Image (cartoon, helix red, strand yellow):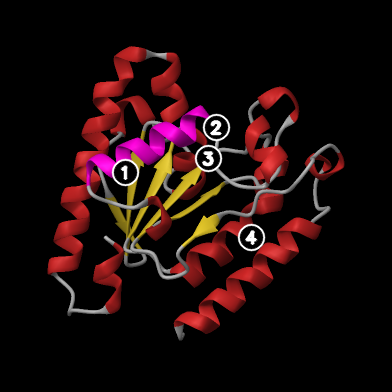
Amino acid sequence: MASSDAEDALEQVHAQIRACRLCSLSQNRTRAVPGEGAAAADVMFVGEAPGGDEDRQGRPFVGPAGRLLTEQLKKIGIDRRNVFITNVVKCRPPGNRDPQPAEIEACRDHLLSQIALVNPKVICTLGRFAAQTLIDPRLSITRQHGNPRRMSGILYLPIYHPAAALHQARLIDALESDFRRLRALLDEELDDTPSSPRRAHA
């Protein structure tokens, strides 16, 4: 799919998300948060759910966790504008509670459509909910963060959620290690493929 076609198709998905009423989260949202970034990104980040800042702005990862994510990307030489960022659920759960199974299921097709259209080389799942939704429902983020799995031609890398590192300072070293692992994996993936415009995204 041509880049412009992918961008158009992605925007159609995002319009559907903004109008979505498939679960009760839509009743109390200020804005749905579809996601943002490059339509042909090598790296896709999938978090848990929007928080208060995201709900107000309609953009993913714009609060403190988002700033930490941007910092970690910069440390490994990646511009945030060149990745794609979204969440498992697209509307803020009340009080920032955990998303419920029915809410995750209601958003699943939206997320899968985004993955299919972006077609990244690496998907980084941020935290437990994203990892268990996309990789393995039994996955332990504590034990398996930083360990990639290849599924359907895409490398999935479970890493700690930046919010966890903000709340537990002892996790910052692990988070930084996970991002260095991402840099190494991305370099390997790019080295194994022919030169293409995507290389510029890293």
The three-letter amino acid code for the residue at tag 1 is Leu
Q: Which mark is residue 61?
A: 3
Report the residue marked by disc 1: 73
Q: x and y percent of residue 201 in the render?
A: 31, 64
Indicate yes or no whether the magenta region holds residue 199: no
Viewer can see residue 63: yes
Q: CA distance from mark 4 to mark 2?
A: 23 Å
For image coordinates 54% across by 75% down, the residue present is 7
Mark nearer the N terminus (3 vs 1): 3
Report the residue marked by disc 2: 63
Q: CA distance from mark 4 to mark 3?
A: 18 Å
The prevailing secondary structure element of the residues shown in magenta is: helix
From the viewer's perspective, is residue 138 above or below residue 38?
Answer: above
Mark nearer the N terminus (2 vs 1): 2
For image coordinates 55% across by 62% down, the residue present is 112
Q: Which mark is residue 189?
A: none
Mark nearer the N terminus (4 vs 2): 2
Would you say 47 lies left or right of 147 here? Answer: right
Would you say 130 lies left or right of 169 here? Answer: right
Report the residue marked by disc 4: 110
**Viewer-closest of 11 and 98:** 11
Mark nearer the N terminus (4 vs 1): 1
**Viewer-closest of 19 and 123:** 19
Q: Residues within 10 Å of mark 2 (few under 14, many from 20)?
A: some
Q: Residues within 10 Å of mark 3 (few under 14, many from 20)?
A: many
Label 4 close to label 3 by CB (< 8 Å): no
The three-letter amino acid code for the residue at tag 3 is Phe
Q: x and y percent of residue 63 in the render?
A: 55, 32
Magenta span: 63-76
Q: CA distance from mark 3 to mark 1?
A: 13 Å
